[in-house]
């Protein structure tokens, strides 16, 4: 068996087409969609991530409002910037790039963000809405995984989803999302982590296996149920190269396979773009 590759770039292009129409409608109403970005320090990886978001915005005609603060910035300076973004009508939603430099409190700044402008869906208010199953900005990577599975007609309702990794940005949020009683969800979800002595008895039960552990080579072909959908979001860097959580040979066992690059990453960007356009529509009453 050779798995069907879940290509996130294909889905991203489709979503961009839909967003262009929505952005044009907002433009006709006199609204220019605006995404704010906050970068603190000069970490190259963080800078690249923010730059990719800004390039996506430019492609779609979304205004990019960017502020970079030095690593020597104080918490008070960050708080002042968050307050300005909260009240700036040109900023419909925004992100703060994580992590902050040592000595600065990202969680404190996140609590200060207006939940309606939280483009990453990570504010506790929005995570609470996710748990309740009520509308609100949803975490981008979990929503992207859901949309990717839905696009490729991977059955989710009633299936067993096993998630390896309990991080807030992927594992915990995805477990809540896929267990909701709504379309492309309603699954039985098991959440495990690398502290479990033997992962295989859990992973072999999965109809959908999502791996977000950041542990190279963690999942091998013998740990996967034949025909399962396998989605990886976690990876580490070894000798300057990406070292994925899932052995690429798993693609010979799985029915669907999301590679370490080109699958979930584009979908995370797609959901962020969706969230900022949705925020602009709410602001405009559309």
Image (cartoon, rainbow, N blue to C red):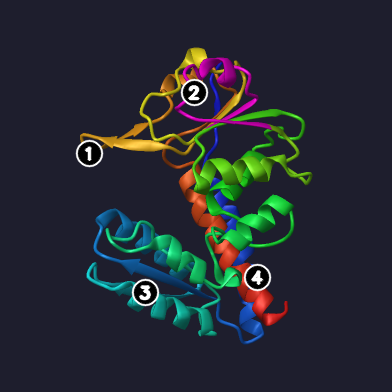
Q: Secondary structure at mark 3?
A: helix
Closest to the camera, between mark 2 and mark 1, is 2
Closest to the camera, between mark 1 and mark 4, is 1
User: Going from the N terminus, do you reach mark 2 or mark 3 first?
Assistant: 3
Crowding at mark 4 (Cα within 10 Å: few <14, some 14-19, many 20+): some
User: Going from the N terminus, do you reach mark 1 or mark 4 first?
Assistant: 4
What mark, if any, has residue 78 been given in the picture? 3
Q: Is residue 90 magenta?
A: no
Query: Can you identify the residue that label 2 sits on?
Result: 196
Compared with 227, 182 (above or below) is below
Residue at image position (42%, 36%) is 260
Q: How much space separates mark 2 and mark 4, taking CA atoms?
A: 45 Å
Tell me if 21 is positioned left or right of 236 in this view: right
User: Going from the N terminus, do you reach mark 2 or mark 1 first?
Assistant: 2
Query: Can you identify the residue that label 1 sits on?
Result: 240
Span of residues in magenta = 189-210
Residue at image position (56%, 21%) is 254
Q: Position of residue 277 (x, y in %)?
A: 60, 69
């Amino acid at each position: 068996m050779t798995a069907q590759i879940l290509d996130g770039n294909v889905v991203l292009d489709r979503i961009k087409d839909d967003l262009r129409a929505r952005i044009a409608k907002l433009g006709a109403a006199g609204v220019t969609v605006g995404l704010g970005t906050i970068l603190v320090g000069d970490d190259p990886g963080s800078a690249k991530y923010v730059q990719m978001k800004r390039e996506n915005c430019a492609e779609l005609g979304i205004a990019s409002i960017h502020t970079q603060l030095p690593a020597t910035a104080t918490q008070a300076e960050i708080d002042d910037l968050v307050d300005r973004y909260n009240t700036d009508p040109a900023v419909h939603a925004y992100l703060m790039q994580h992590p902050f430099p040592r000595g600065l409190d990202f969680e404190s700044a996140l609590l200060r963000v207006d939940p309606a402008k939280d483009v990453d869906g990570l504010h506790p208010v929005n995570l609470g809405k996710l748990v309740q199953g009520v509308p609100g900005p949803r975490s981008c990577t979990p929503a992207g995984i859901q949309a990717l599975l839905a696009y490729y007609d991977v059955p989710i309702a009633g299936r067993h989803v096993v998630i390896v990794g309990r991080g807030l940005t992927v594992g915990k949020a995805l477990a809540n999302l896929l267990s909701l009683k709504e379309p492309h969800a309603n699954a039985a979800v098991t959440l495990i982590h690398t502290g479990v002595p033997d992962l295989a008895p859990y992973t072999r039960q999965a109809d959908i296996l999502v791996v977000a552990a950041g542990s190279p080579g963690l999942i091998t072909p013998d740990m996967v149920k034949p025909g399962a959908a396998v989605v990886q979001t976690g990876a580490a860097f070894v000798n300057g190269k990406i070292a994925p959580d899932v052995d690429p040979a798993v693609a010979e066992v799985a029915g669907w396979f999301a590679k370490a690059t080109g699958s979930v990453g584009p979908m995370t960007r797609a959901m962020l773009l969706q969230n900022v356009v949705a925020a602009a529509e709410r602001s405009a009453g559309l």
